[in-house]
Image (tube, rainbow, N blue to C red):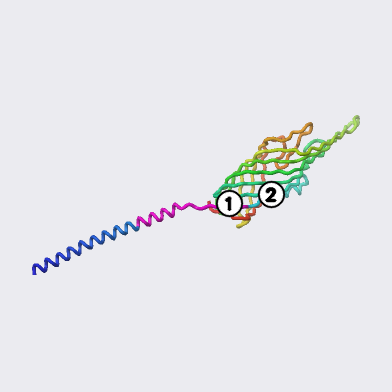
Amino acid sequence: MKHRLSFIFSVLVTCTLMGFQLKAQDVEVDSLIVESNQKSIEDLVKIKTFYPLIRDVSAVVDYGKILGYLSGVEKKNEIGVQLGIKKNLLIVAEGGYSTLNPNDSYVNADYQVRGIYFRFGTGVRKVIDPKNSLSLSVRYAMSDFEDQGTINVTSSSGLFEPYEESFSRKSLTASWYELVLGSEKKINTKLSLGFYFRLRVMSKYDEQEPYDVFTIPGYGRTFDNTVPAVNLYLRYFFVGNRGPN
């Protein structure tokens, strides 16, 4: 009887020890599983968002130029193309044509200037929320234009004969730089409305004597070395659109 009790006691002790050992193995396995899951989550978190090389392609129309037609002083047409590169880089190209008849060009003069202009630049875009974004870019611009005018001088006393002189200059050029701040709001997946604030800085232009060029297509009046301007535009996306930042 004593031997039987000893045998039973030994079996119970052995089973208990085996149970503790199996429990320890389970805990170790559970720890490994938890650790493995944590590593998997960390790996998922570390995955970076993929941005294609060309994220979007869009065209821009400056609808604010329509107001110039209503005034009768200027006729301007301008269009641009923009590429969204990777996450937030931009490449911009713009072109336009304008005919200007400034009323305050010269005293007793009829003056007109017309020509084409182009702008090229690069910048960055920052998405504020799903509908709004800001952009900052630097652009180089150039213009090829011509001007003409007629100067009329009449003596109020009648002692002198009226004097009239005409001039016409062709193949004139100018170049300048622009710092452009943009704000844009998405209407839908294809259309956006926005505005550009431009600060234009003159580089050089073909100065003339005795009557200098009064204004340059795409730039503005020549007697200002820096010219601020605001453009209103409509953007249409051919490919892609703004995504989350």
57 relative position to 101: left or right: left
For the image shown, how many numbered marks are present on the structure? Answer: 2
Q: Closer to the camera, 177 or 68?
A: 177
From the top left corner, tell me how far across and down residue 28 is, in percent. 29, 57
Q: Amino acid at mark 1?
A: Ile
208 relative position to 237: left or right: right
Q: Is residue 97 above or below residue 212?
A: below
Which is in the foreground here, disc 1 or disc 2?
1
The magenta segment is 34-57
Q: Closer to the camera, 242 or 92?
A: 92
Residue, far bottom: 1
- Name the residue beneath numbered marker 1: 54
From the top left corner, tell me how far across and down residue 234 is, in percent. 66, 52
Q: Amino acid at mark 2?
A: Ile
Which quadrant of the view contains residue 36? bottom left
For label 2, the SS is strand
Task: Estimate the spatial distance between the alpha carbons at disc 1 and disc 2, rounded to whole Å.
Answer: 20 Å
Where does the N terminus fall, quadrant-wise? bottom left
Q: Is residue 15 above or below residue 65?
A: below
Would you say residue 39 sits in the magenta stretch? yes
How crowded pointer 2 is (Cα within 10 Å; few <14, some 14-19, many 20+) is rated as some
From the top left corner, tell me how far across and down residue 174 is, in percent. 71, 38
- Name the residue beneath numbered marker 2: 79
Q: Closer to the camera, 118 or 215?
A: 118
Would you say residue 242 sits in the magenta stretch? no
Q: Earlier in the sequence, mark 1 or mark 2?
A: 1
Which quadrant of the view contains residue 110? top right
157 relative position to 114: left or right: right
For label 1, the SS is strand
